[in-house]
Image (tube, rainbow, N blue to C red):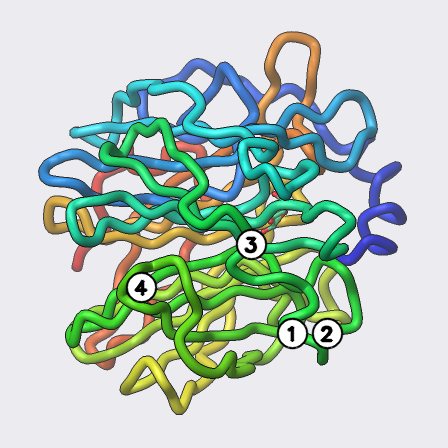
């Protein structure tokens, strides 16, 4: 997120939000309609898909106001159960605010929640925390008692919100990796205890990287998908991606996967395979709740089918209102 760009864009965004015709088929986009939600992170547990989101509560022209994370689940990709909040940013005693992007991963019989928050003045800037629960619906509690990553651990960065948006991925050898970043992207191993970085933090910034990295693997190919910003041609973020033959690279840039989200400066990918289908979760700012229109800090999560070419590259995703209520495209 670029602060200056966001502020410059606000008057335009405020004008550009007609109320959408909403209330169509269950499962159409946006998939959650009674609250503003952002930064979707899917996790499959058995036959259920859980979706972790940040709760957008910005008032009027406030940029972001995110105090807590919510979780929803589904077994049919149409009907979503609201399990409520799983944690507040201030449940990390060392954090001041900002329940920003997160991801949950299951390992060793527990659910590990990695997320970005604003650290208190002992380590100024954004930081990454880790929380744990015995259940995918929480409650989650701080697993470490201090930040896993602080702004001071990545000294090359030029801004205080560089260490955000963690994505976690367990490779076939059982090693769990964490990647994160804003403008610079980083990757590191996690120790088996899931609460400490193991070894060096390596910079892997791909072309046009802005934020919101998401790691996944399909077949023998590794994917790093992220919110991108082409500073010369685009005002709003889009999704781009790179692929690699191993989690340690080398990464090859594969270009843009999506356009920007409707009325939204930010976009944020979360990719998952569920019941034989691949999906990409995103967010836009097309939702109206009561008298509140979508805005930069009032976003709404969406989902689309994801399709792959024979060489493993991903087919460009068109963001629709029908989403997964439309017939699945051919594989
Ligand atoms: O939701 C707050 C921030 O906006 C996230 O951390 C970024 O990915 C962007 O979506």
If you read the primary sequence from the N terminus, does the residue marked by circle 3 or circle 4 appear first? 3
Mark 2: few, some, or many residues within 10 Å (few <14, many ≥20)? some
Query: Which residue is label 3 attached to?
Result: 147
Q: Quadrant of residue 223?
A: bottom left
Identify the mark at residue 169; answer none if there is no mark.
Answer: 4
Query: Which residue is label 1 attached to?
Result: 154
Viewer-side residue, 30 vs 117: 117
Q: Quadrant of the N terminus?
A: bottom right
The number of discs equals: 4
Which one is in front in this view, the residue at disc 1 or the one at disc 4?
Answer: 1
Residue placed at 40% from the left, 49% from the top?
103
Q: Position of residue 328 (x, y in %)?
A: 21, 45
Q: Quadrant of the C terminus?
A: bottom left
| Apparent side of residue 121 relative to residue 4 in the rendered image (left or right) | left
Asked which secondary structure carries label 3, the reply is: loop
Query: Which residue is label 2 attached to?
Result: 157
If you read the primary sequence from the N terminus, does the residue marked by circle 2 or circle 3 appear first? 3
Asked which secondary structure carries label 1, the reply is: loop
Q: CA distance from mark 3 to mark 4?
A: 19 Å
């Amino acid at each position: 997120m670029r602060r200056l760009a966001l502020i410059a864009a606000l008057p335009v965004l405020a004008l550009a939000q007609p109320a959408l015709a909403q209330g169509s088929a269950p499962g159409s986009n946006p998939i959650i309609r009674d609250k503003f939600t952002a930064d979707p992170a899917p996790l499959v547990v058995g036959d259920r898909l859980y979706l972790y989101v940040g709760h957008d509560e910005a008032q009027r022209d406030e940029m972001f106001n995110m105090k807590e994370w919510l979780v929803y689940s589904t077994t049919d990709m149409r009907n979503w159960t609201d399990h409520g909040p799983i944690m507040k940013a201030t449940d990390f005693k060392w954090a001041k605010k900002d329940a920003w992007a997160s991801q949950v991963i299951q390992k060793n019989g527990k659910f590990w929640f990695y997320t970005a928050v604003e650290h208190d003045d002992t380590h100024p800037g954004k930081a990454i925390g880790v929380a744990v629960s015995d259940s995918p619906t929480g409650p989650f509690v701080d697993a470490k008692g201090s930040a896993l990553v602080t702004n001071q651990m990545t000294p090359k960065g030029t801004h205080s919100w560089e260490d955000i948006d963690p994505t976690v991925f367990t490779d076939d050898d059982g090693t769990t990796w964490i990647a994160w970043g804003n403008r610079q992207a980083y990757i590191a191993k996690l120790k088996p205890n899931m609460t400490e970085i193991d070894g060096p933090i390596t910079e892997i910034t791909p072309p046009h990287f802005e934020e919101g990295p998401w790691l996944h693997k399909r077949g023998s190919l590794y994917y790093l998908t992220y919110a991108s910003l082409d500073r010369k041609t685009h005002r709003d973020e889009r999704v781009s991606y790179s692929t690699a033959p191993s989690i340690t690279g080398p990464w090859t840039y594969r270009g843009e996967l999506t356009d920007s989200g409707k009325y939204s400066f930010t976009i944020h990918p979360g990719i998952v395979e569920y019941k034989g289908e691949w999906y990409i979760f995103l967010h836009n700012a097309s939702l109206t709740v009561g008298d509140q229109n979508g805005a930069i800090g009032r976003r709404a999560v969406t989902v689309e089918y994801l399709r792959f070419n024979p060489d493993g590259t991903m087919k460009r995703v068109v963001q629709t209102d029908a989403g997964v209520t439309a017939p699945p495209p051919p594989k």
